[in-house]
């Protein structure tokens, strides 16, 4: 098998690090060849706080995935999240010199580059600039302005901002693990690609990815991403609460949450009790399931309410911004019993649990199609898309090269016109990846 046809997603989370190797099968679905996961040490709320431990965890996950797939991993697509990510809405415009010429990729690049000049807080950098809709000479709601005439090109943008140092630290960990950074993607976007269907994105949907350290939100409407947010709470805070509330150790708290936890206290009878072995010769502890679910309920309500505030900030109550497809829950935290009902109760919106099987090959393991691995599956798909883009660009270059050889003189001008947008059009994340790479190379 050609090694360049495979893609590797590396999800550096707060509780676990997952390396997933995949390729496209003949039906265009992602086939997962190997998966490795390790306990994440050195990451707190999505931000690396211990480089050495993170490197060890990455290497362990990568080795496991390599052993299962029988392949050597070189390049990885990495997801970034963390409490330092925030987003804002911004509109900008450019005035074109000649309105008799149709709008092309270059004009859009000029507009996007202008947004990148926004003044940010110290240490922050713009990660994503996502155009919402365009306006040409005052005509609104234009989805695709290329090929149209007009003098003034305006657009509303969704701008995602993050801390440079956090992104560089992740790059550093990947590089020190002996891997190359192939691409960087925002984790809520990766999860959305893995679990949402195109119809849901069109109708309007809020994706809530409940991880260990953070809860990510991505809102889509009319097929375009409208809002993103990272809330610095996740499943770990729930475990912490159980640990404190029941005076037990973390390992036991985590097991209790997974096995007996429920987000709805009304479900449990008063006489349902679970006995936990005491430490070193101490008496076992008895905990009522009703108390357990009360502790969980209190914290989960807080997390959902914070997410709901963000959904309200997007403005979902307006008729035009209505989220018809409601809410999709994914991530490890979404497996909590009765969470779906609680979310529906608090928000009054239809809710489902999102499994990343939308784009997976039919014979995939049930384990892989778990909400736990939504981000990793999304990162693999992102890597495959990136490779396809590169393949197309190479073909275009080869075709142009052949055309250039055929008629050197007559094609020069035309060739410039064809080639320019192809070279120019690079998503900002590709540029960011290159910048992180350059920075790391120079730092060594």
Image (cartoon, rainbow, N blue to C red):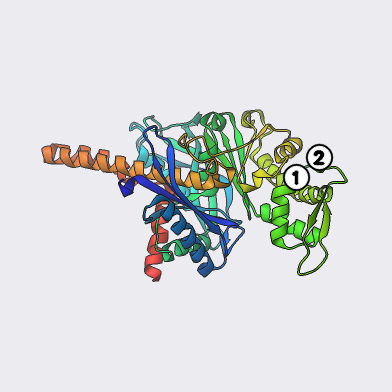
**Circle 1 sits in a helix, a strand or a loop, which is it?**
loop
Residue 181 appears left or right of 262: left
Residue occupying the point 62% across, 58% down:
45
Q: Is residue 164 above or below residue 110?
A: below
Residue 262, numbered label = 1
Residue 267, numbered label = 2
Q: Is residue 336 above or below residue 74?
A: above
Q: CA distance from mark 2 to mark 1?
A: 8 Å
Foreground residue, 129 or 60?
Answer: 60
**Circle 2 sits in a helix, a strand or a loop, which is it?**
helix
Q: Where in the figure is residue 328, as x and y percent of width and height? A: 62, 37
Quadrant in which the C terminus appears: bottom left
Q: Where in the figure is residue 25, as x and y percent of width and height? A: 38, 37
Foreground residue, 232 or 55?
Answer: 55
Residue occupying the point 70% across, 54% down:
255
Foreground residue, 161 or 215?
Answer: 215
Q: Pointer 2 and pointer 1: residues touching (CB < 8 Å)? A: yes
Q: Quadrant of residue 206?
A: top right
Residue occupying the point 21% across, 38% down:
399
| Mark sitting earlier along the chain (2/1) | 1
Q: Quadrant of residue 276?
A: bottom right
């Amino acid at each position: 098998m050609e090694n360049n046809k495979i893609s590797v997603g590396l999800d550096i989370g707060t509780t676990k690090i997952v390396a997933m190797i995949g390729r496209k099968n003949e039906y265009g679905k992602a086939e997962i060849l190997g998966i490795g996961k390790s306990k994440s040490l050195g990451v707190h709320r999505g931000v690396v706080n211990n480089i050495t431990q993170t490197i060890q965890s990455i290497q362990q996950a990568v080795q496991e995935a390599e052993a299962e797939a029988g392949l050597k991993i070189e390049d990885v697509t990495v997801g970034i999240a963390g409490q330092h990510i925030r987003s804002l809405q911004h509109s900008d415009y450019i005035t074109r010199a000649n309105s008799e010429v149709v709008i092309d990729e270059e004009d859009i690049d000029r507009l996007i580059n202008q947004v990148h000049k926004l003044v940010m807080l110290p240490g922050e950098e713009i990660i994503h600039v996502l155009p919402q809709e365009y306006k040409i000479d005052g005509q609104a709601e234009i989805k695709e302005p290329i090929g149209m005439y007009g003098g003034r090109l305006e657009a509303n943008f969704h701008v995602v901002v993050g801390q440079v140092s956090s992104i560089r630290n992740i790059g550093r960990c990947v590089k020190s693990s002996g891997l190359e950074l192939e691409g960087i993607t925002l984790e809520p976007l990766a999860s959305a690609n893995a679990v949402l269907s195109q119809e849901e994105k069109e109708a309007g949907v809020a994706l809530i990815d409940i991880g260990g350290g953070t809860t990510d939100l991505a809102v889509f409407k009319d097929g375009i991403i409208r809002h993103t947010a990272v809330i610095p709470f996740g499943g770990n805070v729930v475990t912490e609460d159980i640990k404190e509330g029941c005076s037990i150790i973390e390992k036991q708290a985590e097991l209790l949450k997974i096995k007996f936890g429920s987000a709805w206290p009304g479900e449990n009878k008063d006489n349902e009790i679970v006995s936990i072995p005491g430490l070193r010769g101490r008496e076992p502890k008895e905990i009522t399931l009703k108390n357990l679910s009360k502790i969980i309920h209190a914290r989960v309500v807080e997390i959902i309410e914070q997410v709901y505030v963000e959904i309200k900030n997007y403005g979902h109550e307006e008729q035009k911004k209505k989220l018809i497809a409601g809410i999709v829950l994914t991530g490890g935290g979404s497996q909590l019993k009765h969470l779906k009902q609680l979310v529906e109760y608090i928000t009054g919106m239809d809710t489902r649990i999102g499994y990343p099987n939308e784009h997976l090959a039919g014979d995939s393991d049930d384990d892989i199609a778990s909400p736990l691995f939504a981000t990793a599956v999304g990162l693999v798909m992102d890597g495959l898309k990136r490779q396809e883009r590169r393949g197309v660009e190479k073909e275009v270059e080869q075709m142009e090269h052949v055309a250039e050889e055929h008629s050197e003189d007559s094609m020069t001008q035309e060739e410039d016109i064809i080639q320019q947008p192809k070279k120019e059009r690079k998503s900002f994340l590709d540029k960011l990846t290159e910048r992180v790479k350059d920075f790391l190379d120079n730092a060594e």
